[in-house]
Image (tube, rainbow, N blue to C red):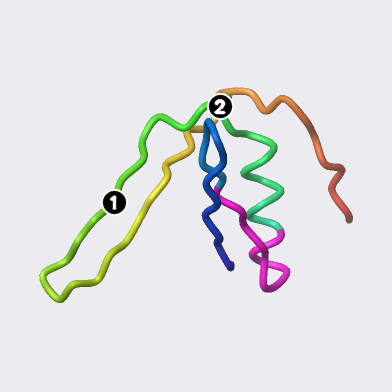
Amino acid sequence: MIAKVTEYGGCFEVGLQPEGLADATLLVRMAMVHKREPSMVYCFADQDSTLRGRVVIPKLVTPHSKVPRCT
């Protein structure tokens, strides 16, 4: 998965681009079961000067959309 962060006037956008079928499946699943707003946004600085970011998107108890299963 390729991620790109863009800053706009009043918000940040984390854009995600799948690199394969597994990534695409995960992205569709995340879109189906996410809550309206992320509850956790982190930035980590490791001792080796590596910087990492994380956005945690909670799931709904009941999905608000459905994708038909292929059998």
- On residue 35, which mark appears? 2
Name the spot of residue 59 as percent of width and height, x first.
53, 32
**In the image, is residue 69 above or below residue 10?**
below
Q: Quadrant of residue 48?
A: bottom left
Using a 10 Å C-alpha cutoff, classify the residue at mark 2 as few (fewer than 14 neighbours), some (14 to 19) or many (20 or more).
some
Q: Nearer the viewer, residue 39 or 33?
A: 39
Question: Was residue 20 drawn as part of the magenta stretch in this picture?
Answer: yes
**In the image, is residue 14 above or below residue 36?**
below
- What amino acid type should be assigned to the residue bearing mark 1? Cys
Name the spot of residue 18 as percent of width and height, x first.
67, 65
What residue lies at 63% left-to-right and 55% top-to-bottom?
A: 26
- What amino acid type should be assigned to the residue bearing mark 2? Lys
Q: Quadrant of residue 42?
A: top left
Using a 10 Å C-alpha cutoff, classify the residue at mark 1 as few (fewer than 14 neighbours), some (14 to 19) or many (20 or more).
few
State the CA–CA distance, disc 1 to disc 2: 21 Å
In this picture, residue 55 sits left or right of residue 43? right
Residue, disc 1: 43
Quick one: quadrant of the N terminus?
A: bottom right
Q: Earlier in the sequence, mark 1 or mark 2?
A: 2
Helix or strand or loop: what does disc 1 sit on? strand
Name the spot of residue 17 as percent of width and height, x first.
66, 63
Q: Which residues are magenta?
A: 14-24
